[in-house]
Image (cartoon, rainbow, N blue to C red):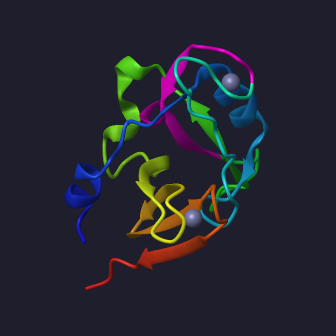
Amino acid sequence: MNHGSLEARINDIRFCRNCTFLAVDKWKGWPIRDAVPVLPMLKGSKCPICGGSDEIVSTSIGWLNIHGLYSTGLPDYWVLTVAEESLGFVKKFPSKWGLPYYELLKCRSCGGDFFASLFIPGLGWQLRRWCTGCGMDETTEDRGEP
Ligand SMILES: [Zn+2]
Ligand SMILES: [Zn+2]
């Protein structure tokens, strides 16, 4: 699969803005290996967690690598970062590492919300899908080798 077809599948998932900022600030880890926080979507026009009504689109949330002062190679860890929607920076594949909240489908076993995270580390890609209903959690990858 090439990056163009991955790009065509991007969803604009609408999350509660307030809860997104709170959760995203706490996450630290490695893309795909460490699960990203479950973010609430508004039901009607209110967030079921905080009651807020402001939204943010999933394509505003990106991966950001953090290097220590003396690091020369791999990042020390990654964080989640939120950009202004107008920049659309995370849609520029493949330079921005993919999307922590890439796709939303219906779970094939329980019908629940089935999210996907996409990570593009340079060569190939990794996808982790998880269901907020039944807890199904699966990782697939394409090493992108000839
Ligand atoms: Zn909320
Ligand atoms: Zn499920």
18 displayed left or right of 89: right
Q: In this view, does 137 lie above or below 85?
A: below
Residue shown at the point (46%, 19%) measured from the top left = 84
Q: Position of residue 98 (x, y in %)?
A: 43, 51
Q: Give the range drawn in magenta.
A: 50-65
66 displayed left or right of 2: right
Residue shown at the point (54%, 56%) measured from the top left = 112
Q: In which quarter of the image is residue 85?
A: top left
Residue shown at the point (23%, 66%) measured from the top left = 2
Front residue of this view, candidates 26 and 92 = 26
Q: Is 31 included in the stretch rendered in magenta?
A: no
Quarter of the image with the C terminus is bottom left
Q: In which quarter of the image is residue 48?
A: top right
Quarter of the image with the N terminus is bottom left
Q: Position of residue 69 (x, y in %)?
A: 76, 44
Q: Where is residue 71 in the image (x, y as percent from the top left)?
A: 71, 54
Q: In this view, does 131 lie above or below 61?
A: below
Indicate which quadrant contains ligand 1: top right
Front residue of this view, candidates 132 and 34 = 132
119 displayed left or right of 6: right
Residue shown at the point (52%, 64%) measured from the top left = 129
Q: Is 60 included in the stretch rendered in magenta?
A: yes
Count how many numbered circles sit on residues in the image: 0
Front residue of this view, candidates 106 and 20 = 106
